[in-house]
Image (tube, grey):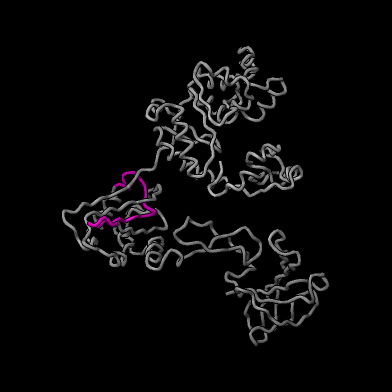
C-alpha cells in the first residue's frame, strides 16, 4: 500500500525500515525497490550498497495496524464480513454479494477505484477459498485475479510454497527437499506429508494448508465486531431558540446506552439542526471513559449561548462519537457518598472551559538527558506513561534553561568550593558526585560536551544541583562552564 500524497515514491526505490538485531532492516519496499532486489528483513546497509539512491523512512507498524482496522470496517460496503489478514491486507467474504455490483470483475474494479481515491494501491484476488485468494493476491501474475473452483489447482501450481502461509522454518525445510512450488508439494503422496507433519501446528503443516487452499478444510472468516453507536435524538414539534433544556435528557439517553454495553464516552458531538437547513456542531471530550450524565452535560456549559439560532432549531442529537470499554469498580463495600471531585472530571471541566491545549500533564521520554527525560501531553489524550521515579540525587523541578554560575575550584576536575548565583555567594559544605552524562550523539552535534553533575549543600543547608559542561583540554572548546540546573526542596 502507499499513502496519499506520496506518489513521488512510486518512481524511485523507497523502503520502510525497522530495528533489527544488527541495525536497521527493510520492513517494506515499493515496486522499484523490489525490482532491484530489496527484500524484507534485509539489512539497510547492504541494500544501500546495491542502490546508493535508495530512500528510506522509519516504519510505523502500530499506526499502520490502526489504519488497517479502520479500513476493514470501511470495506464492509461491499459485503457484511471482513477481517484483517496479516500485516498488509484484509479479507472479504463476498459470497452472495458480488451480483449486487454486477459480478466479480465489476466488484473488483469498484474496489480498486474507491481505494485509489483514498490514495491506496492494491492487489486484488477473488477465489473460492481464503487461502487461494491470499496466494493469488500476493504471488499472482496480475494485480487482479479471479479464480474459479475448477481452476484452483492449475492457478496455484506454479506459485512458490511461501504462498501457503507457512512459517519460515517449514519453508526452509521444503526448499531443502526440493519442493519449491505448490504444484511440486501437491504431487507428494499425502501419507508422506502426514508422517512428517502430523503433529505440526497449522502454520507449520503444509498438508493442512493445502486442504485449506483447495477447500477440503473449512476456513471461515471471523471478523471483528464494529463498535456500537451511541446516539440520542430529540425531534421537536416546533422550532425553539435555546436547546439547553433538552441536553440533560439526551445525555441520560446516551449514558443508558453506554451502560447497557459496558462502555464510556470519550468524545461527545452535539448537533443542532436549524429550520433553514444549517447545522451547528459542538464537540467536547473527556480524559477517561465516562457515563455520568450530569458531568457530560456540564462539559457544554458556556458553549450553547454562543450559537446563532436563526429561525429556531427543530432537531437536536447527541452522540458519543468515540467510546471505550469501561469497567465497573466498587471502591468500598458500604459504598459511601464520595464528596470529592474526581481528577478526571476536573480535567474535563478545565479543558472544556480553557481549551484542549491549556491543560497538560507530564510524560516520560526515552532520554538520559535530564531536560529531555520528561515532556507534556494534553490531558485529554491517551493516559501517559507513568513517570519513572527520579534518582534521589536529582531534584523534581529543573530550571529551564539552566542558569550559568561562577565557581571557585578546590580541585580543577572536582566540585567547586563556592559558587555565585544571582549575585549571592554560596559556600559549599558538602557534595555528592559526580554523575557523568554523555551527550546523545545521534541527535546532537559532534562538538557537544559531556556533563558532570554534583549535588551540593551550602553552609546554610540549601541544596543545589550543579553541573560542569566539558572537561579541561577535552578538545571541544575552552574552559568548562558551570550551570545550576535545579534545586532540592
Q: Is residue 344 visible?
A: yes
Is residue 480 toward the left or the right of residue 208 in the image?
Answer: right
Is residue 79 toward the left or the right of residue 210 in the image?
Answer: left
Residue 168 part of the magenta-drawn span: no
Residue drawn at x 39%, y 30% is: 101
Query: Among all residues in the image, which is located at the extreme left?
Result: 237
Residue drawn at x 44%, y 37% is: 75
Up-down relation of residue 248 to residue 411 (above or below): above
Is residue 227 toward the left or the right of residue 21 in the image?
Answer: left
Coordinates of residue 2 in the picture (x, y in percent): 56, 43
The foreground one among 434 and 432 is: 434
Quadrant of the image containing the N terminus = top right
Up-down relation of residue 339 to residue 155 (above or below): below
Is residue 444 toward the left or the right of residue 138 in the image?
Answer: right
Quadrant of the image containing the C terminus = bottom right
Coordinates of residue 353 in the picture (x, y in percent): 37, 67
Q: Quadrant of residue 481?
A: bottom right
Residue drawn at x 58%, y 21% is: 156
Amino acid at each position: 500500500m502507499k499513502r496519499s500524497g506520496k506518489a513521488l515514491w512510486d518512481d524511485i526505490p523507497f523502503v520502510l525500515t525497522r530495528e533489527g538485531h544488527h541495525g536497521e532492516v527493510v520492513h517494506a519496499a515499493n515496486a522499484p525497490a523490489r525490482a532491484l532486489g530489496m527484500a524484507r528483513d534485509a539489512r539497510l546497509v547492504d541494500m544501500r550498497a546495491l542502490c546508493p539512491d535508495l530512500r528510506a523512512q522509519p516504519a510505523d507498524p502500530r499506526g499502520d495496524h490502526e489504519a488497517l482496522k479502520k479500513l476493514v470496517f470501511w470495506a464492509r460496503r461491499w459485503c457484511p464480513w471482513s477481517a484483517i489478514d496479516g500485516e498488509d491486507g484484509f479479507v472479504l467474504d463476498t459470497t452472495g454479494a458480488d451480483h449486487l455490483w454486477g459480478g466479480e470483475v465489476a466488484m473488483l474494479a469498484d474496489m480498486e477505484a474507491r481505494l485509489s481515491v483514498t490514495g491506496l494501491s492494491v492487489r486484488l484476488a477473488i477465489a473460492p477459498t481464503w487461502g487461494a485468494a491470499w496466494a493469488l493476491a500476493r504471488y499472482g501474475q496480475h494485480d487482479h485475479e479471479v479464480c474459479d473452483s475448477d481452476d484452483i489447482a492449475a492457478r496455484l501450481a506454479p506459485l512458490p510454497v511461501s504462498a501457503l502461509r507457512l512459517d519460515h522454518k517449514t519453508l526452509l525445510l521444503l526448499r531443502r527437499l526440493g519442493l519449491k512450488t505448490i504444484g511440486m508439494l501437491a504431487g507428494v503422496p499425502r501419507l508422506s506429508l502426514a508422517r512428517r507433519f502430523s503433529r505440526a501446528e497449522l502454520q507449520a503443516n503444509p498438508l493442512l494448508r493445502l486442504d485449506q487452499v483447495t477447500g477440503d478444510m473449512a476456513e471461515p472468516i471471523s471478523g471483528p465486531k464494529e463498535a456500537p453507536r451511541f446516539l440520542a435524538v430529540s425531534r421537536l414539534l416546533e422550532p425553539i431558540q435555546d436547546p439547553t433544556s433538552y441536553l440533560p435528557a439526551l445525555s441520560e439517553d446516551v449514558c443508558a446506552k453506554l451502560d447497557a454495553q459496558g462502555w464510556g464516552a470519550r468524545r461527545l458531538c452535539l448537533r443542532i439542526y436549524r429550520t433553514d437547513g444549517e447545522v451547528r456542531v459542538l464537540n467536547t471530550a473527556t480524559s477517561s471513559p465516562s457515563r455520568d450524565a450530569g458531568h457530560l452535560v456540564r462539559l457544554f456549559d458556556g458553549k450553547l449561548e454562543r450559537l446563532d439560532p436563526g429561525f429556531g432549531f427543530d432537531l437536536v442529537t447527541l452522540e458519543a462519537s468515540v467510546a471505550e470499554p469501561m469497567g465497573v469498580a466498587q471502591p468500598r463495600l458500604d459504598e459511601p457518598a464520595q464528596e470529592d471531585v474526581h481528577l478526571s472530571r476536573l480535567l474535563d471541566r478545565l479543558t472544556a472551559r480553557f481549551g484542549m491545549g491549556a491543560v497538560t500533564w507530564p510524560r516520560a521520554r526515552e532520554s538520559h538527558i535530564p531536560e529531555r527525560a520528561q515532556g507534556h501531553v494534553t490531558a485529554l489524550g491517551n493516559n501517559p506513561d507513568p513517570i519513572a521515579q527520579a534518582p534521589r540525587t536529582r531534584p523534581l523541578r529543573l530550571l529551564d534553561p539552566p542558569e550559568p554560575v561562577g565557581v571557585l575550584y578546590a580541585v580543577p576536575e572536582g566540585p567547586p568550593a563556592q559558587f555565585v548565583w544571582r549575585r549571592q555567594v554560596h559556600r559549599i559544605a558538602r557534595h555528592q558526585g559526580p554523575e557523568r552524562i554523555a551527550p546523545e550523539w545521534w541527535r546532537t552535534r559532534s562538538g557537544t560536551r559531556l556533563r558532570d553533575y554534583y549535588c551540593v549543600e551550602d553552609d546554610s543547608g540549601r541544596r543545589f544541583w550543579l553541573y560542569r559542561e566539558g572537561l579541561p583540554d577535552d578538545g571541544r572548546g575552552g574552559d568548562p562552564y558551570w550551570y545550576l540546573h535545579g534545586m532540592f526542596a
